[in-house]
Amino acid sequence: MIRPSTKLGQSLTLVVPGTLDGLADALRMAHAFCDELDAPGLARANVMTALDEVLANIVHHGLRDAAGTIELTMGRENGQVVAHVADTADAFNPLLMPAPDTTLPMEKRKLGGLGIALVRALTDEVSYDRRDGRNHLTLTWRLGAEPSKDGNAD
């Protein structure tokens, strides 16, 4: 269930349980927020895909079956959409994960790592820190910026 701190407009803050239902609620509200901002199609797709990946990883890998919460804060600042995700899972900095070697044949690749590579490709900036017993991931997208061939906006 979404806590009453939820609001739409130029910002959104919500706290959901770290469950599949909580994930669905958070993504539904993030989509509504992007609708209210009238975010361009590509920016909206990048925001939603990256958030889906981050939130799903928290639920499936960070919290697993443990009780926990996810806080999502989104805002529009200076022509950018900024999303801040905080969770109560064990400490994990996804930005320290090595990039997957996609040149190897499938049978020789290590499992994992593609999600954060996708998130990095879909965002203009991503940062992590651990404080107050929670993981904090901040994702930024410039509105109206077209991605370059390396997946980052110019």
Image (spheres, rainbow, N blue to C red):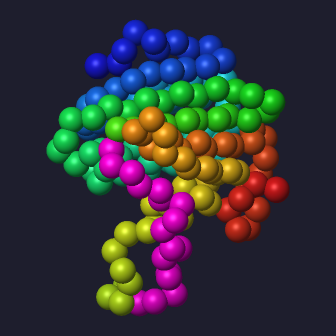
Q: Is residue 22 visible?
A: no
> So how many labels did they put on this image?
0
Residue 151 sits in which quadrant?
Answer: bottom right
Percent position of residue 135, x then y = 45, 44
State whether the magenta stretch is mostly helix, strand or loop.
loop
Q: Is residue 103 visible?
A: yes
Q: Is residue 93 above or below residue 48?
A: below
Q: Is residue 101 left or right of residue 133?
A: right
Depth check: give the residue in front, 111 or 27.
111
Percent position of residue 63, x then y = 27, 45
Residue occupying the point 41% across, 90% down: 105
Q: Is residue 150 above or below residue 127?
A: below
Percent position of residue 100, x then y = 48, 76
Residue occupying the point 54% across, 27% down: 73
Q: Is residue 56 left or right of residue 114?
A: left
Residue occupying the point 54% across, 47% down: 129
Residue 97 belongs to the span the image colors magenta: yes
Residue occupying the point 62% across, 14% down: 9
Q: Quadrant of the C terminus?
A: bottom right
Magenta residues span: 89-105
Residue 41 belongs to the span the image colors magenta: no
Q: Quadrant of the N terminus?
A: top left
Q: Is residue 7 left or right of residue 62?
A: right
> Of all residues shown, which one is farthest toward the front?
132
Residue 83 sits in which quadrant?
Answer: top right
Percent position of residue 123, x then y = 64, 51
> Of all residues shown, which one is farthest toward the top?
4
Depth check: give the residue in front, 52 or 57.
57
